Amino acid sequence: MPLTAEQAMLQVQERLKSLKSLVCEIETERKRNETNINNVIRLTKMTSEDKSPALNHKLKTLYKVGLQDALQEETLIRQALSKIQDIRNIRNERRIQARNAGNKETIRRGALMKMLQISAQTLPLFVSKPGEKIPHLCGSIAADSSYIAKPGDMVAALVKSEEGEENWILAEVVQYVSSTSKYEVDDIDEEQKDRHVLSRRRIVPLPLMRANPETDGQALFPKGTTVMALYPQTTCFYKAIINQLPQTANDEYEVLFEDPTYPDGYSPPLFVAQRYVIAIKQNKKTTS
C-alpha cells in the first residue's frame, strides 16, 4: 500500500535517528581501534630489536584484537549504509507516487545534469567479503535474464525518433506490463517529455551498485572493451572504448567515444561514471 506523506516522513525520521546512532558508534569504534593500531605500530618497532617470545605473543594478541575491531567497524558501516539506502528508497517511492498523481516536477537541463552526476557518485558501493560472489547489476555485471526493472529505476532504452532514427537514451521505468512483456519508460530529458512502450529487448537496466576497484576489479570492464556510455552533458548513450579503468571507488572510467569527425575515429578521452557505462546490447531483431 502506498505511503502517505506523513508515513514517509516518519519512516525517514526513524531511519535518520538510527543512522545518527550508528555514526556515533562508528566514531567510538574508530577511536578505540586507533588506540590499538598505535600500540601495534609501537610494538612492531620494538620487536625489530627485541625478539623475545613474550613480546611476539603480545603483538599477536593485539593483531587479533585489531582484526575483531575492524570486523565490528565494518558491520556498523554496512548497517549505516543500509539505513541510507532505506531513506533513498522511501524518497524515491514518494517521488514516483507524486509523478503518478500528475505532480511531476520539471527539472531544468543544468539541474538535471547535476542530478545525474550526484546520482552516479552516490550509487551504493559494493565491497565484497572474502569468497562473496559479486551480484548482478554491480559494475559491469549485467542483470539476470529474468530480471525486471522496478518503477523508478534508470535504464538505457532504445527508442525511435520521428525521423525513424534509433537511439539509446537514458530513461526511467514507469512500469512493466507482464501481460504484454513490455516496459513503459519516460525519457529522463524533461525537454522531450516522451513516454515510450518498449519490449524487454530494447531495455538495458543500469547498475544498481558501483564496483570497488580495490576489492572487486573483476566487476569492471577490461581496458579495450567496446561499451555503451552516456556522453557527458547529454542523456544519450553512444559506443565507446574503455581507455582507462577506475583506480578507486570514486574514480570514473576514461573512455574514447566513436566519432568520425576525428582523424582516428575516436574522441579525446572523456570521463564517464560507472553507472552510465554498460555492455552493448546485441539485438538480432528489435520490436517496439
Image (spheres, rainbow, N blue to C red):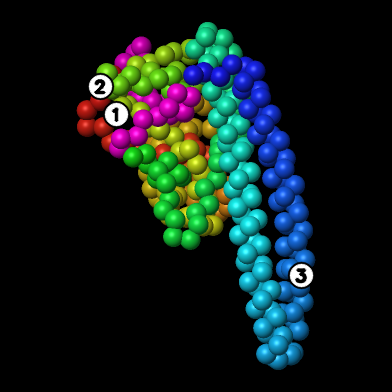
Considering depth in this image, is 32 or 198 the residue closer to the camera?
32
Question: In this figure, which residue is indicated by the disc labeled 2?
Answer: 287
Point out the tag, 2 or 1, that comes first from the N-terminus. 1
Q: The disc labelled 1 sits on which kind of residue?
A: Arg
Q: Which quarter of the rendered picture does the C terminus lie within?
A: top left
Distance CA(mark 3)–CA(mark 1): 56 Å
Q: What stretch is highlighted in magenta?
A: 145-171
**Residue at 42% over, 41% down:** 137
Point out the tag, 3 or 2, that comes first from the N-terminus. 3
Q: Residue 201 carries which label?
A: 1
Whether residue 229 is in magenta: the answer is no
Q: Where is residue 10 in the image (x, y as percent from the top left)?
A: 66, 24
Q: In this view, does 32 lie above or below 198?
A: below
Tally the numbered discs. Answer: 3
Callout 1: 10 Å neighbours few (<14), some, many (20+)? some
Say which quarter of the image contains residue 113.
Answer: top right
Question: In this figure, which residue is indicated by the disc labeled 3?
Answer: 38
